Structure formats: C-alpha cells, structure tokens
Image (cartoon, rainbow, N blue to C red):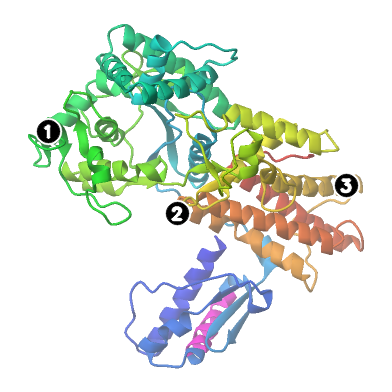
Amino acid sequence: MLSQIIQTHLAHSVNQVFESLQADQRQGIIIPLEQPANLEHGDYSTNIAMQLAKSLRMAPLAIAGLIAARLEQQGNMDGLLRKVEVVAPGFINLFMDWQEWAGRSFALPPGSGDKIVIEHTSVNPNKSMHLGHLRNSCIGDVLVRMLRKTGHTVEVHNYIDDLGNQLADTVVGLLHVPFEGEYVRFGDYCWDLYAKVNKEYTQHPEMTHKRTEILHGLEEGQGNMAWLGNLVAERIVREHIEEMRNFGIEYDLLVWESSIVKEGFWAAASTLLEQTAVYVRESEGKLAGCWVLKQAVTDSSGTADSEEHLQDKVLVRSNGILTYTAKDIAYHLWKFGLLDRDFSYTPFTGEVWTTGLTGKKLPYGKADRVINVIDYRQEYPQQMVKQALQALGFQAQAARLHHVSYGVVSLSPASAAELGINTGDDRHSYAMSGRQGIGIKVTDLALLMEKTIEEARPDKKGLSSRIIAIAAIRYYLLRYNLGTEIVFDFRQATEISGNTGVYLLYSYARAHSVLNKGQDLGITVSRPVEFPQDLEKSEAALLRHLSAWPDTLYNAGKELAPSLICTYAHGLATLFNNFYAVCPILKGEEVLMRFRLWITSAFVDTFSDVLQVLGLPAPGRM
C-alpha cells in the first residue's frame, strides 16, 4: 500500500533525525498522514514536525527541514516521491511521481490467517423480512466481502431463533386466530397474521398464556407444537434465503436455536457456569426462581444493571424456559470451540448447510474471531455474552468478540405515505413495526423501486431495472455510518445524480463505454504508459484517489466500517466524471489519448473491485 510505504520512509527519516540530534528516541511514534483537499498542498501531508517540537526542543519548521532532507537522502522513497516541500509552521508536503507509481503494483498486507465467523441476518422465522432486516444483511455481507478480499478466512452464519416468542406468536395465530386472504408467499400471510395475533393480545391479554404453552412445546421438541413450529420456521427461512440471494447475499451455515438445546449445548454451558460465583438462582424479588448472571454490565449510556436491562441478565426463567441470552452464550462457546460437543450438518439449499441431529461432521466453528451484526438495541445482551466468556476465564475469546452495532431503518414521510401509512402528524420519519404490520417487505420494496426505475429510464437496454433497483437499495443502506438511523426514501434512493447506487453504476458504464469507443478507434492502452509533462488537476486528483483504494479497503476491514468503502466509491465516481467533463479523452494527440484511456482503464479496474466489495454489479451498459 502506498501510504504504508510513505509511513515507513517517514518513520525511518524521523529516527535518523533523532540519531543526528543525539536525542532519546520515543518508541511508537505515530506519524499522521493525510491527503490534503487542495492539491497544491501535496498528494500527502504530515504535521509530525509540529508534534515533535516539544520533545526535540526545536522549531517545527527546522525539524520539518531535517526530516525532508533525510527523505531526499533515501532516494525520494525509491523514486516514488517527486518533490518534498516544507511549509510553515512545520508541514511536510509530499508530491508523488505518478508515472513511477503507475509502473508498480501495491499489495495489501497478508491476512492474519485467523478464521473469522460472521453472524448476520438472523431474522426471526415468523414472517417475511422487511427493510430494517435488510440493512443487517447488507452490512454483514459487505463485511464478509471486505475481510475475504483482505486475505481472511470467513465463515458466514445465519442464526435461526426457532424457539422464540415471535415464532410462538405466529403458531398461536395459526392455531387460534381465524384468518384468511390471498397470498403468494407463506411469509406474507404470516406477516398479516402476526400483526393480527398481537392485536388479539392487546384486546384479550389472557391469550398470552397460549404463547407460553407453545414456547414450552417448541423447547421440548417432541410433540405437535414442535413439529408445527419447525415446519413454519423452515418454510419461512427458505423464503428469506431466496430473498437474500436476489441481493447477492449468501450464507455458509444456518444455526438453529433448537439444535443448540437438543444437542445439549446449553446443558454443557450451564455446567460450566455453575462452577462460577456469578451464575445464581434468585430466591426473592422480581426475579425469584430465575437463574441469572450476576456480573455488572455497563451499557453505552454508562448505566450498570439498569431496571431496563434486568431481564437481559436472566438465563433461565422461573418457569424453566431458557432466554435468548442463555442460548446465545452456549452458541458463542461453540463458535470459539470451547464446548466438548458439536453439531451434525446436512445440506439445506444450494451451498448452504444446516445444523441438525443427523448428518456429516464438518469443520464449522472453532473461530479465532467472532463478529456479530446486530442492531444497537441488542448492545446490552451482547455485552452479557462477552461478560459470560470473561466469567468463565475465556478472556482472549471475549476480547475477540465484536458486536457491529447499527441504527434502525424508518421510512421518510413521502415513502410512508406511498405505502398508505397515515402521516398526518407530520413526523420526521415513521418507524416500522412487525407487531403492528407497519413497514415494507423486502420483496415489495424491490418491486416498487424496480417499477420506479423502469418508468424513469428512457433506454431500457443494458441492466434490467430490477438489478438496478436492488443495487440502489443495497447502496442506500450501506452508505451511512453504522450508528446512523436511516430514514429511507424510495425516490431519493433511485436518483441518477448524488451519492446513490444508480450514480455509481452510471459512472462505471460511462467509463466502460469510453474504453469500447477507444478500441473501435484502434487506440490501444499499453503499460507502461507515457505521462504528459504536466498533469491536469482533474487527472492528478483522480490518480491520487485511485492510489488510495488498497488503503481504504484495508482500513475499512480493520475498522469494520462499510461506509468507508461507500465514501471512497462516491468520491472516485465524482472525480472520474469531473475528469471526463474537463479532459477530452478521445480527442487530441494520440499520445495524450492513450494516457487518458489508460487513466480510464485504471478507473474501470479499480471501480470494478470497489463495486464487487459493495455487492453491486459492474455494468458495461446501463
């Protein structure tokens, strides 16, 4: 990576300055490096001289001069550096030799060799998926793509909560709530049935005991209730997987919560926990009769064991029913290979395998790192899992358990109104609620946006409107920082200009078209290419951004931040379109045309890589 090479040379130069001044060298000096917004301030710049002024007791400008001289003595970074400039009050501005850069290859650092298990999607198998669920899946999928691209071994899990309240409510509806309607998919039928069941609970609270009965039946796993729950969950999970496959999202393994119980994972985890002082049975108070984890956990607000989170500490309820957190602790002990038992595995659909009571023994689990993509409302239970690992003495594993938290998705007033939701109260956004049947199903969203795009595009050759719609949805859900709560707007997501997936696809297709036209004119792109003596600003800016792709990919993978890729992608597309507008690519002297076609080719190669990581198509034509 270019920035890593620059950092290495700067660090060496700084060390030489310390030696020449016979100063005590400070270990672990972090050298800040940035790409200035103004090209006149260099391709890269550092203020390290100002940071060292106090310890070296020298003026920053003098220190910067010494560092710059050492850089030049190193052969200007082996020829990659064209010019070093020292600017008051102590900046060192670096101007790269882009022709030299173009003739080299820059590899990412080798992967650690660690096995990473990423759990994402994990939607309750009781109804069709909605837009909010899709954000989880898109984030998880891009994390998988980023980490595999940077050399990691990644295993993708989808955890199926087939023993939870939501599935129990749907089964209650099937057994006790008369309902009918015309539906193509079972999940869509259950979407409306689930809302109707929760309405029944409100009107007839005594009905909730049916949920408890069915929860017991599901967990016992032997009778009619268990089989019915299994049939409902499996049918809906198959629909979920097909929906996600349409979005380019795949899984390696489905882990069923019922398998964790049936295979004795919780029994093994419970035996381990009973040997600690923090797993106790409460004898009085609100949680009397419950088995709880007594460790203090501090949530993001700094509140430890708040009233709101008391129930999250319960692992076994007083009625004997296990909580989600209990089974999650057992699941994570298995993920890290810390239990003395394993699942059996059978094919589910396509390349996806599933846990079960019979089947093959396969090398799933045994992770070095675990990443869970779960929205911010599950932060406290995730901390409980980490605390359980720590209480059991698995400190290293707890440190390598990462919760990728994200904000929920709501609908803009315009989008909510389009769905028939009452927007008379003039709110900024409208939250989705499965219990109330409010929201938009993933399949319906894709159809709605496909129709919008189909009606708007004059040329219907090239990519189908459906593929464009799916790309637009994916990108809209990925472009925001993880902590941001997204207000989804159907129309905004399909705009051709601005920071949208459609804009990215058009940019790639435009560049691809330019290369085809150059080929038709008989102009070949060769390497190494001859650079003009002076670059146009738009050419230099585009080259600089192209050079930053390996660093961006590496940092995004390190920080688990898909939005960094989106920011880079939009910036690269914008710089290419500016270059396209300012610099005639297929006009002028042939040597200049060859150079500009080479830049276009470099953009296509890099942008194809970027789009692949984001899970977007790279169209030759829109």
Q: Comparing marks 3 and 1, which lies closer to the viewer?
A: 1
> Badge 3, how many Cα within 10 Å: few under 14, some, many 20+?
few
Percent coordinates x, y for residue 45 in the rendering? 56, 75
Name the quarter where the C terminus is drawn. top right
Instruction: Name the residue carrying label 1.
Output: 288
| Residue beneath disc 3 | 517
Residue 68 within the segment the image draws in magenta: yes
Taking 569 as reference, is 241 left or right? left
Residue 336 visible in the shown view: yes
Disc 2 from disc 1: Cα separation: 42 Å
Residues at marks 3 and 2, CA–CA distance in whole angstroms: 40 Å
Front label number (2 vs 1) = 1
Please tell me in which quadrant of the rendered image residue 574 appears: bottom right
Crowding at dot 1, Cα within 10 Å, few <14 / some 14-19 / many 20+, comes out as: few
Above or below: residue 241 compared with residue 490: above
Q: Earlier in the sequence, mark 2 or mark 1?
A: 1
Which residues are drawn in magenta?
63-76
Residue 444 appears at what percent x and percent y? 62, 28
Residue type, numbered disc 1: Ala
Q: Mark 2 points at which residue?
A: 559
Q: Nearer the viewer, residue 202 or 576?
A: 202
Q: In the image, residue 56 lies at what x, y percent?
A: 38, 89
Residue type at mark 3 is Lys
As drawn, which residue projects farthest toward the top?
Answer: 224
The answer to whether residue 554 is above or below residue 505 is below
- The residue shown at (8%, 36%) is 284
